[in-house]
Amino acid sequence: MAKPKTGSKQKLSPAAAKKKAERDKKIAMTPARRKKKAENQRKRRAATKAGKNVKGKDYDHTRGKFVSEKANRGNYGKGTKRLKK
């Protein structure tokens, strides 16, 4: 059984939380993110139909397979900041 998540919510003021929600929504609705979300849903439904257990896993678009949520975070050690050219 998976360990329950604790304390994962950021401690933000109401104003900061609202601004963050707006930023997150804007990013989530970009064409690239929507395409990835749709692909993820298709893959997840197909995997479930094929009898695979994908609970607690995310589809990694770089590796092309389902990996743990933990392994699918952090941009492979490069962090989440955009790299300067």
Image (cartoon, grey):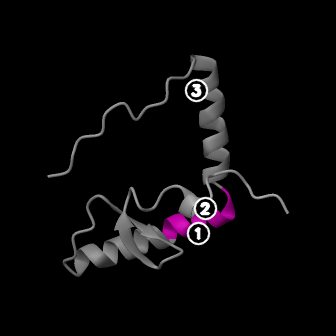
Q: Position of residue 24 (x, y in %)?
A: 61, 43
Q: Which residue is mark 1?
A: 35
Q: Residue at x 85, y 63 (%)?
A: 85
Q: Residue at x 22, y 76 (%)?
A: 52
Instruction: Kindly state the secondary structure of the residue where label 1 is placed.
Output: helix
Which numbered marker is on residue 17? Answer: 3
Q: 9 above or below 72?
A: above
Residue sitting farthest toward the left: 1
How far apart marks 1 and 3 lie (CA) works out to 26 Å
Q: Which residue is mark 2?
A: 33
| Mark 3 residue type | Ala
User: Which of the 4 quarters of the picture holds residue 49?
Assistant: bottom left
Q: Main secondary structure of the magenta part?
A: helix
- Read off the magenta span: 30-38
Mark in the foreground, 1 or 3:
3
| Mark 2 residue type | Arg
The total number of labels drawn is 3
